[in-house]
Amino acid sequence: MRSTFKSIIHCGDAAAKAAKDFGGMNSVAPLALIRPAGAADVASIVRLAAKLNLTVAARGNGHSINGQAMADGGLVLDMPAMKDHFRVVRTSRNSGYVDVFGGALWEDVLKRCVRECGMAPRSWTDYLNLTVGGTLSNAGVSGQSFRYGPQISNVTELEVVTGKGEICVCSETQHSELFFSVLGGLGQFGVITRARILLQPAPDMVRRIRLVYTEFDAFTRDAESLVTRRRDHDTFDYIEGFALPNNDCPDGLPSVPLSRDQVFDRTRLPKEAGSVLYYLELAHHYRSSDSISDVDMGVDRRLRGLGFVEGLRFQVDLGYEEFLLRVKKEEEIGRASGIWDSPHPWLNIFVSKSNIADFDRVVFKEILKDGIGGPMLVYPLRRNKWDARTSVALPKSEIFYVVALLRFTPAYPKGLSCESLVAQNQEIVRYCLKKDYDFKLYLPQYESQEEWKRHFGNRWSRIVERKTCYDPLGILAPGQHIFPRIINPSSKL
């Protein structure tokens, strides 16, 4: 193998890195870590794996939670090692696209697009130290998704290496079945080596706003009103929501103000406020040449009629890049404290509008009433912004909520054991199943094919057909535990 691919590493620190991920709950050693220079290398590795009865996993920046990018005894592709590919094309004054390699970090895409051409992608994730291929293999959601859809709705072309070791350029009109299979396909049908991403003019500044609520129905009513307003200039450019304990612990009130000179005045809360509070986080884009009075009036007009607690509105103005890189500051704090490197038993769910009130009553107000040591996101998305031809499984409801339980707690014994937190996640999922919710896990991880069949529902047959077509030997993404590796009788191993 060394004589054929000089970039293969059999052991040492580099290969050991591929046995870990951000979740910190799994450790699976690969046979080797490969640093491909481009699509041709990836295709050669996949074809080699077919001959040797090995599996192949594409690893971005290692931010998976449950070992999804691992390959037990297989080959792991270090996608950021690929040669840099970056090309911007402006198709009009207000639109364009960027061609970028699959291992590129979204943070780098942001900085280069803004600084080189004054444009930026339309849809993001909250954390940008993730790879383009990694988020497109899932969906890529954030506060812009209600308007532009997830990141997979903002891609027009892909270069993909299939499980057959074939390099294919695909789009909505060219090899469309492969194109939509790979988008949200959990890495099962191909490795993304290049993506063409839609761009729009980047703003200079952002007005970031937080509005506090004590009642869940008022919070969801306002959130749904904002994401469904017909005209873009009547709503905001970014909308997310959070639940937090109504107490003085670090999970709660101190995290709501947006600057050190802002104070959360508890006397503003009504006496009947319960154990859980909520807040909407909004963003309004503007140019540095805009007058602040015009910005103020535009924001106030958009907020008119909302039912947040009077006196508990917080806002700050900051640059566009600073806003999009806001989680990076939290990462720096987490790394300094050691929490960033602790296990992260996160849970991400899409919950139908019809079930979200009951979810709040049982999960937020009972199971998680003391918080989780990190953010609890809850905000609505619109199903019509997602393309049904992709491989993502969604709730049936037109409006559904992202619920993300992002735990940042010290490792045991300082904090709760990882097993107890995973058990809490399982309790929540079991409750959703028991109540027959219209829900789907996001970033899903199951151990049996029966669970995957339930996850995909009536789309399972299409998933099987796509796997049979593009990765018939089950070489790709073994860490997802969806399909078994099919033994090749002509194996040379």
Image (spheres, rainbow, N blue to C red):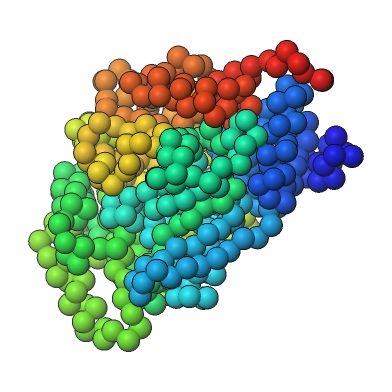
Can residue 95 be spotted in the picture? yes
The quarter of the picture where residue 305 lies is bottom left
Which residue appears farthest toward the left when viewing the image?
305
Q: How many labels does the image show?
A: 0
What is the x, y in percent for residue 319?
A: 42, 75
What is the x, y in percent for residue 241?
A: 30, 51
Which residue sits at x=58%, y=64%?
Answer: 86
Up-down: is 120 above or below 485?
below
What is the x, y in percent for residue 58?
A: 63, 40
Up-down: is 434 above or below 223?
above
The quadrant of the rendering that contains the N terminus is top right
* Closer to the camera in the image, 75 or 244: 75
Up-down: is 212 above or below 341?
below
* Closer to the camera in the image, 195 or 237: 195
The quarter of the picture where residue 281 lies is bottom left
The quadrant of the rendering that contains the C terminus is top right
Which residue sits at x=69%, y=34%?
Answer: 46
Can residue 361 be spotted in the picture? no
* Closer to the camera in the image, 279 or 475: 475
Which residue appears farthest toward the right when viewing the image?
3
The quarter of the picture where residue 197 lies is bottom left
Which residue sits at x=39%, y=77%?
Answer: 204
Which residue sits at x=74%, y=47%?
Answer: 35
Which residue appears farthest toward the front when viewing the image?
174
What is the x, y in percent for residue 385?
A: 28, 47
